[in-house]
Amino acid sequence: MNEYMTLSETAEYIGKSKETLRRWDNEGKLKAIREPMSNYRVYRKSDVDTLFSNFIDDNFDATVSNKVEPHYNYSVLELFAGAGGLAIGIEKAGLNCVALNEIDKWACATLRKNRPNWNVLEGDVKEFDFSEYKDKVDVVTGGFPCQAFSYAGKKLGLSDARGTLFYEFARVVKEVNPPICIGENVKGLLSHEKGKTLEGMISILDEIGYNVVPVQVLKAINYNVPQKESV
C-alpha cells in the first residue's frame, strides 16, 4: 500500500464511512492533508496505522468464509424464498437448490437475475403440488410468515393450522418427505400467543413424523451474517 491513501481507501481500510472520516478531520481526530493539485483529502497510512493499531491486523486472512465443500451433493427445496437471503446462505453451505417458491413477482425477478440457473416457482404456494420431489430432496426450508393459528381444535394438529402459511410449509414437508426440514422465523415467535403458536407448530411437525430440536434464538452476527437474531 502507498504512503498515502485516498478518502475511499482509508474508509475501507478501517471500516468507517467517508462521512465519519470527514467529521473526524473537522474535529481533529484524524487529520487529512490536501493534495496540491486536486485539493482532495488524503491520509498518511502511518497516521492511520498509529491511531488504529489495536484494530488493524495486517495478518488478517480476508478469505475467511462460511462456504464449505460438501461431502455429498445435498439438495434443498425452499418455500417463501423472498429475494434469496436464506437460499444464498444455504448455497454457500454447499447445498444445491432444486427449486424455490415465492409469490412476490419482484422478489422472483431478483432471484432470476442473481441466479439464472435456479428453478424459481412464482406464485401462491397453495397452488403448487410438490409431489414430484417426494423422497428426492434432502432438506425443505421456509421462512414462513408468522400468522396466528386457530386453536379451535383440541389437538393443535395439522387440520387446525389450515389456512395459515405454516400449514402450507407442513403440507409441503409431508408431501416431499425430506430427512430434514428447517423453519426460520423471528424472535417474537417464542412469545407469540404466550408460546401457544410455537407449541402448535411443534405439535404439527411431530404429527407428520419430525422431531423438533430445542428451539433457540441464534445471533446471526456470530456467523458472519449482518443480522441480529432469528429463531
Image: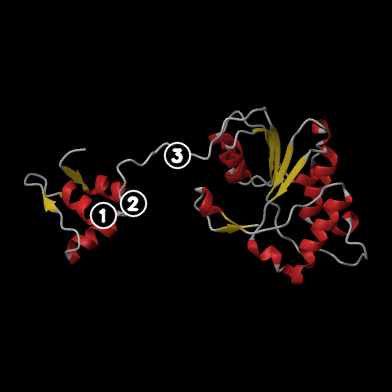
Most foreground residue, 112 or 204: 204
Q: Which residue is mark 2?
A: 15
Residue that protrudes farthest toward the right in the picture = 154
Amino acid type, label 2: Gly
Residue 123 is labelled as none
Query: Could you tell which of marks 3 and 1 lies nearer the N-terminus?
Result: 1
> Quarter of the image containing the C terminus?
bottom right
> Quick one: 61 or 126, which is closer to the camera?
61
Crowding around mark 1 (Cα neighbors within 10 Å: few <14, some 14 to 19, many 20+) is: few
The front one of 75 and 49 is 49
SS class of the residue under badge 3? loop
Residue 154 in the image, given as x and y percentages of width and height: 93, 65
- Could you tell me which residue is drawn at 26 percent across and 47 percent down? 8
Q: Which residue is mark 1?
A: 52
Classify the position of the N terminus by image quarter: top left
Q: Earlier in the sequence, mark 2 or mark 3?
A: 2
In front: mark 2 or mark 1? 1
Residue 36, placed above or below residue 61: below
Crowding at mark 3 (Cα within 10 Å: few <14, some 14-19, many 20+): few
Task: Give the vertical position of 62 relative to 194 (above or below).
Answer: above
Q: Determine the residue positioned at 19% across, 59% down.
A: 30
Q: Amino acid at mark 1?
A: Phe
Identify the residue at horizontal 62%, vertical 30% (top origin).
Answer: 70
Label 2 or label 1, whichever comes before in sequence order: 2
Give the distance between the C-alpha atoms of the residues marked 2 and 1, in whole angstroms: 11 Å
60 relative position to 215: left or right: left
Disc 2: CA contacts within 10 A as few (<14), some (14-19) or many (>=20): few
- The quadrant in which residue 122 appears is top right
Residue underneath mark 3? 64
Separation of residues labelled 3 and 1 (CA atoms): 22 Å
Can residue 210 be seen here? The reply is yes
> Does the CB distance between marks 2 and 1 fall below 8 Å?
no
